[in-house]
Amino acid sequence: MDFSSTVEATPLMQTDVDLTPYNTLAVTARAAYFCEVDSEQGLVNVLKWWKEQQKQLGMDLPIMPLGGGSNIVLAKDFPGLVIHVSITGRDLVEEDDHWLWVKVGAGENWHQWVEYCMGFHYWGLENLALIPGTVGAAPIQNIGAYGVELCNYFAELRAVEINSGVAVTFDSDACKFGYRDSVFKQQMRDKYIITSVTFKLRQEPSLCYDYPALQSHFRDLGIDSPTPHQVFDAVCQVRASKLPDPADIPNVGSFFKNPVVSDEQHKQLKRQCDALVSYPVAGGHKLAAGWLIDQAGWKGYREDEVGVHDQQALVLINRKGSGEQILSLAQKIQSDVQERYGVELEIEPRVYSS
Ligand code: EPU
């Protein structure tokens, strides 16, 4: 009996599955094997079963977890097992006078979770409204927007080690959060599947609205001291005006990270273009990659079925193109920005390619 027939005999498993509906760039790629898990124990069982089968057949096919697929570029078919994590649940596990700890299933939709917090007056995540994807994917890239990052309201997460099937807890230190970064993009890359995230949220609001786009929004409305719901609404409006909804225009949000350059390079770039958008950070200056790409003339650019969004140059969009076409456009932008400004742009989403 070969492996395919073993898999086909298992009700949980599907073979040769089209991943188009499972990635927000909507690129077509196929998974040789695919299964859905809705509990941590279910995931452990699948991993053990898969390992056993692989061992018996002398095979070593890879495993790829997939949540909302909002931060991945699939540039080729996947020869192994895609595990779609759809673990749900939101449980208040503890509270004191100032904080609430809520454990959320990795498969919960991120924006619906933020809306839930607003409804229950669990404060802190207002600025992270409308970010596409699932709760389980959020810590991997430490999602952030308008001055707030996930790590500001993170307590711990549970994850299952792919190799051993053992479930472990990671606290904030163990996650090694950075700007759009965590241990799950570095040393622990492809080693764990996140099953739940526990948030530490505020009982009383502590709002953050000094980001320029929010400030000008409130100035226009004549609001001096907004409520949490007004911050939430403002974030939704500002985001919707600049960032395309993946359901209408397939995309993965910012395609590049905002690069950090040395003080010296910053000075030189400022001489080259006075309007350069940047702000000081530890170790130098962070540049607005969207501004650089925009200045280089790429905003609204179209090439075959892929292109650059016409409201936010940091977002690449797909109109029935392939992952390879998206990556080829990204490389052209990287080379051009490197040539013009001497700045290296790092791709932000995870890339699966040859
Ligand atoms: N800008 C341009 N042209 C553009 C895009 C931006 O000139 O086409 C300028 C803007 O005018 C502004 C500056 O660049 O002066 C920064 O733009 P923006 O406020 O839109 O933020 P960003 O740095 O481009 C980052 C995050 C976004 C997040 C926003 C708001 C990264 C890689 N991106 O974008 O996150 O929503 O700030 O906080 O850090 C994501 O990670 O997928 C994402 C969308």
Image (cartoon, rainbow, N blue to C red):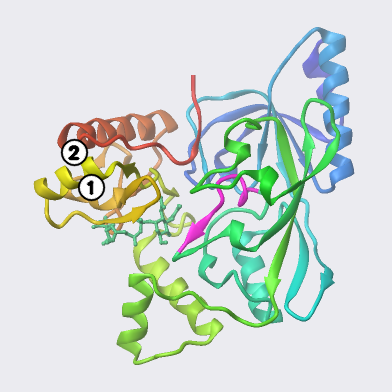
Q: Residue 163 vs residue 188: left or right? A: right
Secondary structure beneath dot 2 equals helix
Residue 247 placed where, x, y %? 49, 56
For label 2, the crowd category at 10 Å Cα-Cα, with few meaning under 14, some 14 to 19 and many 20 or more, is: some
- Residue in view at x 47 percent, y 61 percent: 145
Of 225 and 90, nearer the camera is 225
Question: Which residue lies under the disc numbered 1?
Answer: 292
Measure the C-alpha gap from mark 1 to mark 2: 8 Å
Amino acid at the residue labelled 2: Tyr
Q: Decide which of 40, 342 is in the foreground and name it.
A: 342
Q: Which residue position is annotated with label 2? A: 341
Q: Is mark 1 within 8 Å of ligand 1?
A: no
Q: Position of residue 165 (x, y in %)?
A: 85, 31
Q: Closer to the N terminus: mark 1 or mark 2?
A: 1
- Could you tell me how many numbered marks the image carries? 2
Magenta stretch in the rendered image:
137-145
- Horizontal side of residue 186 vs 80, given as left or right: left
- The kind of secondary structure the magenta stretch mainly shows is loop
Give the x, y percent position of residue 164.
84, 27
